Amino acid sequence: MIEREWREASDMRQATATLAVILAAAALLRFWALGAGIPYGIGVDEPEIMNRAYRMMRTGDFNPHFFDYPGFYIYVQLAVSVVRFIFGAMSGEWHALKDVSALDFYGWGRVITAFFGTATVALVYFAGLRWGTRYALLAAGLMAVMPLHVRESHFILTDVPMTFFVTLTLVLSLRASERAKLGGFLLAGAAAGLAAGTKYNGALALILPVLAGWMTIDARPSRLVACLAAIAAAGLAFLLVAPYTILDLPAFLDGYATLMTSYRGTKYNEPVWMLYLKHLRINLNWPGFLFAVGGVIFGLVRAAKGPGHVRWTLTLAFTFLYFWFVSRQALVYGRYIIPMLPFLCLLISAAVISGVSLLRRFSIPRVARTSLIVALTVGVILPPAITAVGFDIDRSKQGTSRLAYEWIRSNLPPGTAFVHESSLLVPPAPPYTTRHVSQLRLQTYDDYLKEGVDYLIASSQCYGPYFEAPQLHPTEYAEYMRIFEQSREVARFSPTRDHPGGELRIFKVRP
């Protein structure tokens, strides 16, 4: 059953020009400095996807042999890499597969992530139309400048594409509820399956078409069939884009069990849910965070009393479920909350516009109400926009990773053997021999000597927390200091305003 508010919203003139400006701004923020860090400072976990796509291209073996991610985005990057190779061969850049490495495909791969990020802004707009054009434009504008989403749209990771499919699931679920036809619930379920095929926690999006189906009283042929159809479509879509979940079932089960082990056991000084609330507050800034709280309260009232039971229930249900899920995990990363951002943007938009609309009960001129909406819009959009622009400006600068990379190429001969931690700096290979470890301290200095390692590259991403609070990490601090004192520091690159990034220290391994 189509609700009255959605019919009214559809009759309103869509601000096409404003939407075009918002999408242009979203694209600018996500494509700006997109190639920064290639090849010397690629993002954390980018190689997990690109190295496997490259291996598939070289071997023809489409089994990822890696199940930390379901596989869909690896296949997307494989397709993009193949196209990139063909264009490179046509232009004479290379003549055979042996002439390329995985690093040759990062540029095009990041373009795909940035595209998913920009397209998500458009989906937020289409979802917001269920509240009205003004709501949709404000929500899309806020999503366009979300600093965390802007940042992660620069890397070949799964969080931004998964967020696209989660938001697509929301739009299709709302549409299915409006039309009450079986095909709509099938499409919404399939979108949820694609979200799960991109990253496992995307499976939580399945709550959207299932709830929509159950709340659609006149769903055809019945509410139960609509819910079961959505579940079946999600499962089929997942298996289509991540087929080795079944084709290599033992490896999947082993890999998934190992992955789940890594999400248990880490202890923090604060509850995980509090840490994620702080991430949200930093990302939204205080005005947006407070309006998000207001939007949740307003949404709970509307979900219970109406109007708009379905849209409010779906928006709140996924927000609460997803926050509960990530708050139970031991590993805490800011990017894990990205799928919540489209829903929070909708809630913030509703709080701003509907909150001001309540002033109609008082003798306040319409001009004053409109001016207040404009002021509040600027208040919630401007702070995150400044943060997002600042991030892109920093990425455009010559960072510490690039300085260290150029120092290595200028001062050290080919064949030099490195061991490096984190991916803040990846030494050029070839002509150098490189090996990555999670932290240098996990091996002793004598181990590096026996391996014939020439240099160690330490990153503040790894040793920084221990050096900032050695009294809290005495063992880790002592292990790093032992390595640093036994070797000889030959170069240090500390961040400055003109050279942002983490600190990098290069040590010579002395016999």
Image (cartoon, rainbow, N blue to C red):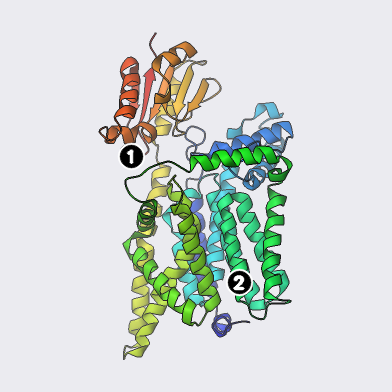
| Residue located 37% across and 36% down the image | 502
**Image coordinates for residue 332, horizontal then vertical, percent:** 42, 46
Judge left or right: residue 500 versus residue 336: left
Amino acid type, label 1: Asp
| Label 1 SS | loop
**Image coordinates for residue 14, horizontal then vertical, percent:** 55, 76
| Residue located 61% across and 50% down the image | 198
Residue at mark 2? 212
| Label 2 SS | helix
The C terminus: image quadrant? top left
Residue at mark 1? 498
- Whether 49 is drawn above or below 129: the answer is above
Residue 129 seen in this snapshot: no
Given residues 259 and 164, the one toward you in this image is 259
| Residue located 33% across and 36% down the image | 465
Residue 102 seen in this snapshot: yes
The N terminus: image quadrant? bottom right
